[in-house]
Image (tube, rainbow, N blue to C red):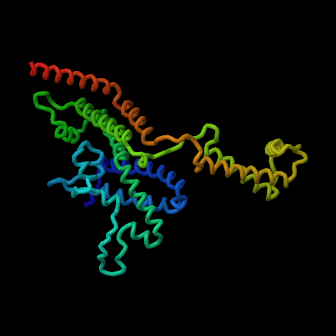
C-alpha cells in the first residue's frame, strides 16, 4: 500500500533512483556500442522502468504487525529485512517487480487482456524491443545493491544532520536501535554518530568486497576524456559558430574585419582577395571535420581511457566517508583495537 512519504523517506527513494539512473546511463553507452538499435527505444524504456521502480520503492510492506516503506528500509541498517527484500522466495521480495516474468500459463479472459507486462507489450510491437526491456530490467537487478549502498552512504545518510543536533523523535529511534545498556549511562549524540559511522564503514567495506568479487560481465565500464581531444562541449561550441558563419556567408551578409582576417589566414589568401566560394568550401570542410571529431568524442570506442566505474566509485565512497566522519574514524579504529586486545586478554585468562 502506497502512502504519503515524509522528507527522509523521499530523500531515500530519490537517492536510490539517482544512482540507479547514473549506472543505467553508463550501461546504455556500452549497449549501443554493442548494438546501435538499443539507442532508439532506450530512453523511453528507462524512464518507464524507473517510474515503475519508484512506485515500488514508495510502497510499504509488512513484517509482522509493522509496515515499512521499501525505499527507506533499503537505506537503513536492518540487513535482515534488506536480504528479505531481495530474496526470490521471501513474501516481501521485490525481485519480480524489477525483473518481470512473462505469464506463460496462457490464462486470459479475453483477447484484449493479453498484454499485462512490459515484455508482452513490446513483444507485440517488436520482439527485439522486448529484449531491450528485459536487458534494462536485468541491469537494474544487477546494480540494485551498488545503487543502494551509494544512496545509504551519501544523500540519504543523516550523519551531518545529527551533527547539528538530535531531535527527540530521532533519539527514541536510535535508543531502540542501539540498545545501549542502562549501566553505560544515557544515549548521547556521540553514541549516535559512532553508530552511523560504523554503518557507513560497513557499507563501504561491503561495497568494496562486492566489487573485488564481481564477475566481468557485471562490470560497468566508462571512459575518461582523452587528453589529446577537445571536450565535446567545446567541439559543439566551435561547430555551432562555424555553421552560423556559413549561413551568414551564404546569405551574403557582411562579415566583420576580424572574422575576414581569421578566414583569410586559415584559407591562406590575402583578406582583400577573399572570395565567397573559397569561404564556403573552407567552412563546409571545417564543419565536416568538426562533426567527425564530435562523433569520436561522443561514441567512438577508442575515445578515452577505459576504467571500471564501480571500482572508481569505491575510492570516491572512501573519500566521502573520511570527509564526513573526519577524526572519528581513527577513534573508532583505536576503540576497536582496544576491545580486541581486551577480548584476547580475557580469552588468555580463561585458558589459564
Examine the rendered structure and indicate whether residue 135 appears above or below residue 238.
Answer: below
Residue found 14% across the figure and 28% down from its top: 185
Query: Could you say which quadrant of the image residue 62 lies in?
Result: bottom left
In the displayed structure, 159 sits above or below 235; it is above
Q: Quadrant of the N terminus?
A: bottom left
Residue sitting nearer the eye, 285 or 263: 285
Given residues 199 and 114, the one toward you in this image is 114
**Residue visible at 36% across and 80% down in the picture:** 111
With 175 as the anchor, is 307 left or right in this view? right
Tell me: 179 left or right of 11. left
Residue 12, image x, y percentages: 33, 47
* Residue 133 x/y as whole percent: 43, 62
Residue 155: quadrant of the picture: top left
Q: Residue furthest bottom?
A: 110
Above-or-below relation of 126 to 38: below
For image coordinates 47% across by 51% down, the residue present is 27
Q: Nearer the viewer, residue 210 or 254?
A: 210
Left or right, 332 with reference to 21 = left
Image quadrant containing the C terminus: top left
Residue 190 in sight from this viewpoint: yes
Amino acid at each position: 500500500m502506497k502512502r504519503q512519504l515524509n522528507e527522509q523517506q523521499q530523500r531515500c527513494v530519490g537517492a536510490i533512483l539517482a544512482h540507479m539512473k547514473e549506472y543505467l546511463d553508463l550501461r546504455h553507452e556500452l549497449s549501443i556500442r554493442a548494438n546501435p538499435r538499443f539507442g532508439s527505444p532506450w530512453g523511453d524504456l528507462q524512464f518507464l522502468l524507473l517510474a515503475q521502480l519508484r512506485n515500488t520503492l514508495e510502497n510499504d510492506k509488512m513484517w509482522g504487525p509493522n509496515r515499512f516503506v521499501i525505499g527507506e528500509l533499503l537505506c537503513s541498517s536492518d540487513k535482515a529485512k534488506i536480504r528479505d527484500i531481495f530474496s526470490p522466495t521471501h513474501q516481501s521480495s521485490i525481485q519480480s517487480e524489477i525483473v518481470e516474468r512473462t505469464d506463460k500459463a496462457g490464462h486470459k479472459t479475453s483477447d484484449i487482456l493479453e498484454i499485462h507486462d512490459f515484455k508482452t507489450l513490446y513483444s507485440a510491437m517488436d520482439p527485439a524491443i522486448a529484449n531491450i526491456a528485459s536487458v534494462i530490467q536485468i541491469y537494474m537487478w544487477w546494480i540494485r545493491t551498488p545503487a543502494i549502498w551509494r544512496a545509504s552512504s551519501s544523500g540519504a545518510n543523516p550523519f551531518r544532520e545529527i551533527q547539528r543536533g538530535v531531535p527527540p523523535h530521532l533519539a527514541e529511534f536510535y535508543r531502540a536501535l542501539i540498545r545501549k545498556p542502562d549501566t553505560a549511562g544515557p544515549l548521547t549524540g556521540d553514541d549516535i554518530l559512532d553508530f552511523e559511522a560504523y554503518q557507513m564503514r560497513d557499507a563501504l567495506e561491503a561495497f568494496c568486497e562486492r566489487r573485488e568479487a564481481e564477475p566481468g560481465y557485471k562490470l560497468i565500464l566508462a571512459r575518461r576524456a582523452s587528453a589529446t581531444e577537445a571536450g565535446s562541449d567545446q567541439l559543439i561550441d566551435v561547430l555551432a559558430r562555424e555553421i552560423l558563419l556559413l549561413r551568414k556567408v551564404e546569405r551574403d551578409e557582411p562579415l566583420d574585419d576580424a572574422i575576414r582576417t581569421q578566414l583569410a589566414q586559415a584559407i591562406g589568401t590575402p583578406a582583400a582577395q577573399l572570395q565567397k566560394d573559397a569561404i564556403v568550401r573552407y567552412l563546409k570542410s571545417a564543419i565536416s571535420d568538426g562533426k567527425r571529431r564530435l562523433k569520436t568524442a561522443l561514441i567512438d570506442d577508442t575515445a578515452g581511457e577505459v576504467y571500471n566505474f564501480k571500482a572508481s566509485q569505491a575510492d570516491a565512497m572512501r573519500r566521502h566517508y573520511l570527509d564526513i566522519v573526519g577524526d572519528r574514524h581513527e577513534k573508532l579504529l583505536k576503540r576497536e583495537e582496544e576491545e580486541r586486545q581486551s577480548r584476547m586478554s580475557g580469552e588468555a585468562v580463561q585458558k589459564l
